[in-house]
Amino acid sequence: MRFVVGYLATPGGADALALGIRFARTLGAELDLCMVLPPDRVLPSIKPVGDFEHHLVAQAEEWLAAAVAKVPDDIVARGHVRINDSIADGLIQEAARAEAEMIIVGGAGGGLAGGYSLGSVVNGLLHSAPLPVAVAPRGMRNSAVDRVREATCAIGEREGADVLLDTAVRYGRAAGTPLRLVSLVALDPTFGALRGDGDAVRERARAHARSVLESAKAELPEGFPVTSTIVEGSTVEDAVGKLDWRDGDLIMVGSSRLSAPRRLFLGSTAAKMLRVLDVPMVVVPRDPLGPDDLP
């Protein structure tokens, strides 16, 4: 198993690296740290003399070597430099080259409040990547936790929920970490908006939660720690805030129904979660990848 870490010599890049190390140790994965350099952008810290691209790549390789040196000895890590007009596309291309299962990036940038403030590169990945993308919250680099403690999977009844559940179960089985299945009842249009006969809506949600739990249990070893809960609230932020979160937790969500087949699209519910969460988020495409889906 291999993960691509989108690296920059910035606090956001350090957050991404910290999350990559945590995931690699939990799942026994290898890391490919990648810096994507636009061919026509001059970095202020580099004097443009001679072959500019050569100097740019040399500086990037120096930063990558320093980052790889920070990876613990029990984790295999490599550094790679790519030249691409689009950083998001460059990371997707690197994931294809490495046959990676996930791209990991830092959320620090500009846009959203809370633990995340997504920049254009992360937004681009969350709206175009054909494989799961994990986003590290700001300050992840300061955590002393070295493994995933528990994964929370936000499951609805929309198309693609089965792919999200399958992915969560597969990672849970590989990591041996507890899995918490959450149904955000009041927020999923499939369940309605908790108007009219609220009791009937809640019973539908309970039945759905039981069904999802049984599906997960059928795929996990006997006795595997998996639980199911229902959360409702007047807003997405209110509902998510009612859950208990600890350092080492993460949340997995599915891509929006608006996404193209086998592509991500960060939906409004997931975007609202980002405003109040301080745990990593993994966004999973709604359709499984085929052998020809990565470029």
Image (cartoon, grey):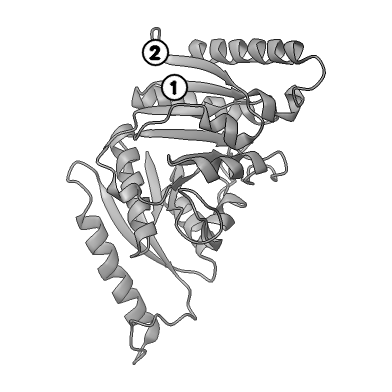
Question: Observer-nearest residue: 186 or 268?
Answer: 186
| Residue at 54 percent of width and 67 percent of height | 86
Question: Observer-nearest residue: 117 or 174?
Answer: 117
Q: Is residue 47 left or right of residue 180?
A: left
Quick one: SS at disc 1? Answer: strand
Residue 179 circle label: 1
Q: Quadrant of residue 160?
A: top right
Number of marks in the image? 2
| Residue at 35 percent of width and 50 percent of height | 139
80 up-or-down from 224: above or below: below
Residue 1 circle label: none
Under mark 2, the amino acid is Phe
Residue 62: x and y in percent read 25, 70
Marks 2 & 1, CB-CB < 8 Å contact: yes
Residue 13: x and y in percent read 37, 58
Quick one: SS at disc 2? Answer: loop
Quadrant the C terminus occupies: bottom right
* Mark-to-mark CA distance, 2 and 1: 9 Å
Determine the residue located farthest toward the top in the rendered image. 222
Q: Quadrant of residue 120?
A: bottom right
| Residue at 34 percent of width and 22 percent of height | 176
- Residue that mark 2 sits on: 224
Under mark 1, the amino acid is Leu
Q: Nearer the viewer, mark 2 or mark 1?
A: 1
Residue 35: x and y in percent read 39, 64
| Residue at 35 percent of width and 27 percent of height | 175
Q: Residues within 10 Å of mark 1 (few under 14, many from 20)?
A: many
Determine the residue located farthest toward the right in the rendered image. 196
Of labels 2 and 1, earlier in sequence is 1
77 up-or-down from 184: above or below: below
295 up-or-down from 85: above or below: above
